[in-house]
């Protein structure tokens, strides 16, 4: 899918949704079986936002594309899990089921399509609600994430587009450990991650002293929030995240906006509202315009309560399309 673009017109916001992204979901009562896409689209439609975007089409990633980030053995393992439909993709809580390979590879392929539209100038920013598998490792799955679409995007930016200084921002309740661990020693991958304190929540990492290793020390910023943290706590953390990102002036921005940080999520204990998601999106749009030619990729990430998913991601889309009524928040970009 190629989005129309005129140099005289603003580049549109691309929204990547479709049946292929939800054709396979985790079985039974697994927390990740929730249909996030439908919950979000219903709310975005009610808000009149769907006529403000250009729709992208999901596609399956090739094995060669998956291997830009993942070990070949891991790609083969997920294929085997998909064929047998039993056991676990990882050692923890990601069950295998028929179609798990296709489900995860479609999220990766869709992200790569969105990336090409941004890099080709056909979209100004992208939003892929069903995506953001930030726990996946190069050699194994983890935390409901068989693959890591964000890692594949980062590697593609380096190998195909020669961009080095990339920012990854994560406000999911769970730290994006698959991204952090894979790039802990990479000084050109700038991370700002606001999440629930790892001493109280999976994956048990993301402590404030985790700032990178070796030459990358200081390029990663982990900002853990205590259980029960509110929007006010988030806004304070965001001011620090914003300053961190400005210091490094990234050439490209990737944002994982998991909705499990909202109050009432069954797998986390934060008490944010969609105002935090709107605030972060607004700030990143300004930073992307300032440093990265407007290039901003947004992934939905987690969220295990349909109403929260709908609220948070609709707030994000309002900002991306410029349809939000802004309220001043301490620390916001003017």
Image (tube, rainbow, N blue to C red):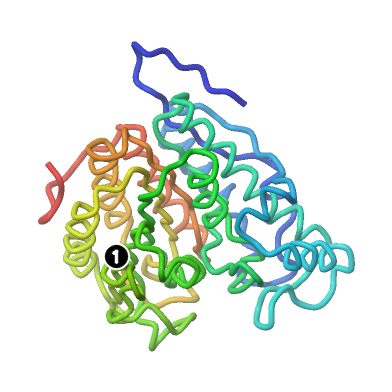
Q: Residue furthest right?
A: 84
What is the quadrant of residue 29 in the picture?
Answer: bottom right
**How many residues crowd around disc 1 within 10 Å: few (fewer than 14), some, or many (20 or more)?**
many
Q: Residue at x 16, y 66 (%)?
A: 236
Q: Nearer the viewer, residue 175 or 155?
A: 155
Q: Which residue is mark 1?
A: 219
Q: Residue at x 35, y 53 (%)?
A: 167
Q: Nearer the viewer, residue 119 or 308?
A: 119
Quarter holding the C terminus is top left
Quarter holding the N terminus is top right
In the image, residue 12 sits, relative to residue 258, either above or below, namely above
What is the quadrant of residue 25 in the picture?
Answer: bottom right
Q: Secondary structure at mark 1?
A: loop
In the image, residue 17 sits, relative to residue 278, either above or below, namely above
Q: Does 272 sit left or right of 94 as displayed? A: left
Q: Position of residue 320 (x, y in %)?
A: 35, 37
Q: Residue at x 49, y 80 (%)?
A: 203
Q: Does 322 sit left or right of 129 as displayed? A: left
Q: Nearer the viewer, residue 103 or 220?
A: 220
């Amino acid at each position: 899918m190629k989005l129309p673009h005129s140099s005289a017109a603003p580049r549109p916001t691309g929204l990547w949704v479709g049946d292929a992204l939800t054709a396979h979901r985790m079985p039974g009562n697994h927390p990740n079986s929730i249909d996030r896409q439908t919950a979000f689209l219903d709310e975005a439609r009610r808000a009149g936002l769907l006529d403000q975007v250009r729709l992208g089409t999901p596609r399956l990633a090739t094995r060669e594309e998956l291997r830009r980030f993942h070990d070949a053995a891991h790609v083969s393992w997920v294929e085997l899990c998909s064929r047998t439909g039993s056991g676990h993709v990882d050692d923890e809580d990601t069950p295998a089921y028929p179609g798990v390979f296709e489900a995860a590879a479609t999220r990766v392929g869709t992200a790569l399509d969105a990336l090409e539209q941004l890099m080709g100038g056909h979209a100004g920013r992208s939003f892929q609600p069903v995506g953001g598998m930030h726990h996946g490792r190069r050699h194994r799955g983890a935390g409901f994430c068989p693959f890591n679409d964000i890692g594949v995007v980062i590697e593609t930016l380096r190998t195909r587009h020669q961009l080095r200084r990339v920012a990854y921002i994560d406000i999911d309740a769970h730290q994006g450990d698959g991204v952090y661990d894979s790039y802990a020693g990479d000084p050109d991958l700038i991370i700002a991650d606001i999440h629930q304190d790892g001493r109280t929540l999976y994956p048990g990492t993301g402590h404030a002293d985790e700032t990178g290793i070796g030459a990358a020390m200081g390029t990663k910023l982990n900002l853990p929030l205590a259980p029960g943290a509110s929007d006010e706590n988030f806004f304070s953390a965001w001011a620090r995240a914003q300053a961190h990102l400005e210091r490094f002036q990234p050439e490209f921005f990737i944002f994982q906006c998991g909705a499990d940080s909202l109050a009432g999520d069954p797998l986390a204990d934060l008490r944010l509202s969609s105002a935090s998601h709107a605030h972060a999106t607004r700030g990143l749009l300004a930073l992307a315009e300032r440093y990265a030619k407007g290039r901003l990729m947004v992934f939905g990430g987690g969220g295990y309560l349909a109403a929260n998913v709908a609220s948070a991601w609709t707030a994000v889309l309002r900002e991306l399309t410029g349809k939000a009524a802004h309220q001043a928040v301490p620390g916001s970009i003017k």
